[in-house]
Image: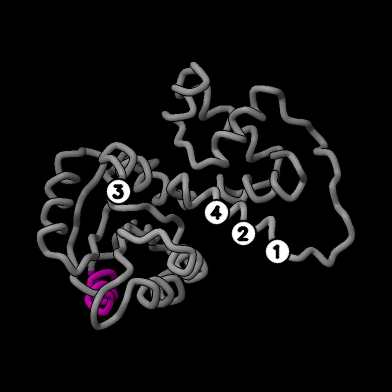
Amino acid sequence: MSGTGTPVRVLLVDDQALFREALATLLEVRPEIEVVGEAGDGAAALTQAADLRPDVVLMDLHMPVLDGIAATRRLHVEQPGIRVLALTTFDDDEDVFAALRAGAVGYLLKDVTSDRLVEALLAASRGESVLQPSVAARVVARFAQLPDDSPPRRQPLVVPLSDRELEVLRALAEGGSNREIAAALFLAEGTVKNHVTNVLAKLGARDRTQAALRARSLGMI
């Protein structure tokens, strides 16, 4: 649920009616999620978003009339308060970076588990970035390939990360959720959440993706 305890309002956008219906059925049993509408293409999604004002739009990318990239770009400009989370079959670099450039806060593949999807929707509603692990790794790799014409700025953090915070940072840079990191490091999920909060604060990052990119630029991971 959102910070106020109310369900996160979600608009489903996919051109496959059967997939939309299955997804709606899957999500409607979760008390923290409220499916407020469905759309079969990007143009219909824009209309529905304007009428329904969802918290998150779960957006397919390859659709008729108006594709998900173009719809995401318009939503980002016209209704910046609505978060877009891409959910697609394709994970090629062109789609990944086009979606992120258009303003999507996350990118997941359709083989994601239901628990991970719900967790991603909740995170997206808070404005956090959510990336499939394979996608997160490619984003960090692409960032590392960018030319850097500025002077070296590898400065130590004012408040250094602890060894445990570094472990959490490496895990989140690989796209791990709090639950997954907790299981891998044998920690309570609440403890991981606290470590993530500290990592973001020390790195001066607004979300997990920015933390991973900043840590990479500083040579920390």
In this picture, which residue range is highlighted in magenta?
42-51
Q: Which residue is mark 1?
A: 146
Instruction: Indicate the position of residue 171 as horizontal and vertical percent values.
Output: 55, 34
What mark, if any, has residue 142 been given in the picture? Answer: 2
Give the left or right position of residue 173, taking residue 116 as reference.
right
Task: Give the secondary structure at mark 4.
Answer: helix
Q: Amino acid at mark 1?
A: Leu
The answer to which of 30 and 109 lies nearer the viewer is 109
In the picture, which quadrant includes the N terminus? top left
User: Are discs 2 and 4 less than 8 Å apart at CB?
Assistant: yes
Task: Give the secondary structure at mark 2.
Answer: helix
User: Are discs 4 and 1 less than 8 Å apart at CB?
Assistant: no
What mark, if any, has residue 8 been given in the picture? Answer: 3
Q: State whether residue 179 is above or below residue 31.
A: above
User: Are discs 1 and 2 less than 8 Å apart at CB?
Assistant: yes
Give the left or right position of residue 204, taking residue 15 as reference.
right
Give the left or right position of residue 199, taking residue 157 as reference.
left
